Amino acid sequence: MTVVRSRRAGIGPEEAKNRPLYARVLGLQYLRPSGLLCFLYFEGAIALGALLALAELVDWWVVLVLPATIAVMVKINDVIAGAALLSASARVPKARGRAKVPAAPVSPAPAEDWRSRQSASRRYE
């Protein structure tokens, strides 16, 4: 079920339904391509393959193979992103409570220096 995959990636069921069809078909768990990017991945690859075939640079079977190849590369990228995310989260220790950051001391700027920054005419005086 896609809901189980979505829960692992931290996506709720409502957000999983609103994802583009391309992302749902590939079962992307960690990448969240927009609708425009999905359009470019699929229809753009078909158009590129057709243009290359019409220019007789490649055979017509490339029109079918090019979108499939791009889909495989996107899925591999999703798997690598998941592995990188899991390894990064394993290295970071879990924080307990809130971290306290000491405030940096603020040194007041000299008055003349502050005024010279305010006007371009005074910059070259």
Image (cartoon, grey):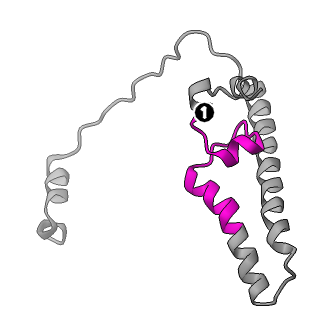
Q: Where is residue 27 in the image (x, y as percent from the top left)?
A: 76, 39
Mark 1 surroundings: few (<14), some (14-19) or many (≥20) residues within 10 A: few
Q: Where is residue 72 in the image (x, y as percent from the top left)?
A: 83, 54
Q: Where is residue 30 in the image (x, y as percent from the top left)?
A: 70, 38
Say if the magenta span includes residue 118.
Answer: no
Q: Which residue is drawn at 57% across and 27% down?
A: 14
Residue 12 in view of the camera: no
Q: Quadrant of residue 73?
A: bottom right
- Decide whether the magenta segment is chiefly helix, strand or loop: helix
Direction bottom: furthest residue = 56
- Image quarter of the C terminus: bottom left
Height in image: 44 above or below 111?
below
Q: Which residue is drawn at 76% across and 75% down?
A: 49
Q: Nearer the viewer, residue 3 or 118?
A: 3
Say if the magenta span includes residue 33.
Answer: yes
Q: Which residue is drawn at 60% across and 40% down?
A: 19
Q: In this view, does 43 lie to the left or right of 59?
A: left
Boundaries of the magenta span: 18-45
Height in image: 48 above or below 30?
below
Q: Which residue is drawn at 75% across and 23% down?
A: 4
Q: Mark 1 points at which residue?
A: 17
- Image quarter of the N terminus: top right
Q: Is residue 18 left or right of residue 74?
A: left
Judged from the image, the secondary structure of the residue bearing numbered disc 1 is helix
Q: Is residue 16 left or right of residue 89?
A: left
Q: Position of residue 40 (x, y in %)?
A: 63, 62
Circle count: 1
Height in image: 114 above or below 47?
above
